[in-house]
Amino acid sequence: MTASNTAPAMIRMEAVDKYFGTLHVLKDINLEVPKGQVVVVLGPSGSGKSTLCRAINRLEPINSGLIEVDGKPLPAEGKQLAQLRAEVGMVFQSFNLFAHKTIAENVSLAPLKVRKMPAAEARKTTMALLERVGIANQADKYPAQLSGGQQQRAAIARALAMKPKVMLFDEPTSALDPEMVQEVLDVMTSLASEGMTMLVVTHEMGFARKAAHRVIFMSDGEVVEDTTPDEFFTAPKSARAKDFLGKIL
Ligand code: ADP
Ligand code: MG
């Protein structure tokens, strides 16, 4: 895919540093994700990928630097923070659906509560989203009655229900049985092709090659490479990226 580097930034990180105690987990991160771009974040375990994602919707506060979403600095608290969390959809490895609510209730909860959407409209929007991720026929079941792949697609629908401007995915297929990985990647690929801005932490190299405009390689809290998938997979520059690719390919 070709990256549109001229689009305005949806996510901007400038000189971001983050520590856990004395552990320096994000080191001077400078990163811009233009609107509509799909960025895959690769790197070994412990390199800071999850912390990077969590910093963007302020699940983790940073120690210094600047993060902007759609041109606005991250709010620290209150209504604006709730608004930011709605605009920045996040999908985790664990699906985090409410066990005692149906799939449709899980998806419509935030629109009803946060957006104060009328019930009939929420049901209509929810069903359209479940249709889009291919599980409309599961709407009135409970999470435990669904496969892992279906639950993760429900989690994606739930994030989309807030009409996010950007979607963050943190290893969305890592907890799935192998036969369910593709159905989730297919939903993500279709979102990407519709122009959603996405930051995706994944070990799925097929997805990175096909759907990403750009690959960020992290190691030890640093962005070590920031390039096209083609370049990254065929001609990685750093020893650390070569070592990483040697282990996974
Ligand atoms: P990745 O997602 O690339 O595996 P993480 O962002 O989860 O990496 O973690 C980066 C580093 O920060 C690791 O060394 C990890 O052990 C550490 N870390 C992550 N979360 C916490 C936390 N809440 N408290 C202390 N250390 C943490
Ligand atoms: Mg992680």
Image (cartoon, grey):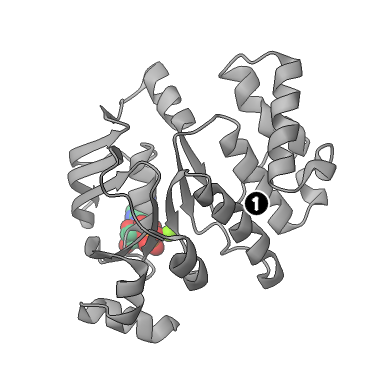
**Quadrant in which the N terminus appears:** bottom left
Query: What's the residue at 64%, 40% (across, down)?
Result: 157
The answer to whether one can see residue 143 in this image is: yes
Graded by Cα atoms within 10 Å as few (under 14), some (14 to 19) or many (20 or more), the crowding at tag 1 reads many
Residue 164, image x, y percentages:
49, 33
Tell me the residue at 30%/83% (across/down): 243
Residue 162 percent location from the top left of the image: 55, 29
Residue 39's image quarter? bottom left
The number of callouts visible is 1
Q: Secondary structure at mark 1?
A: helix
Q: Position of residue 144 (x, y in %)?
A: 78, 49
Q: Quadrant of residue 88?
A: top left
**Residue 100 visible:** no
Which quarter holds ligand 1? bottom left
In front here: 104 or 3? 3
Spot occupied by residue 214 in the image (x, y as percentages of width and height): 34, 60
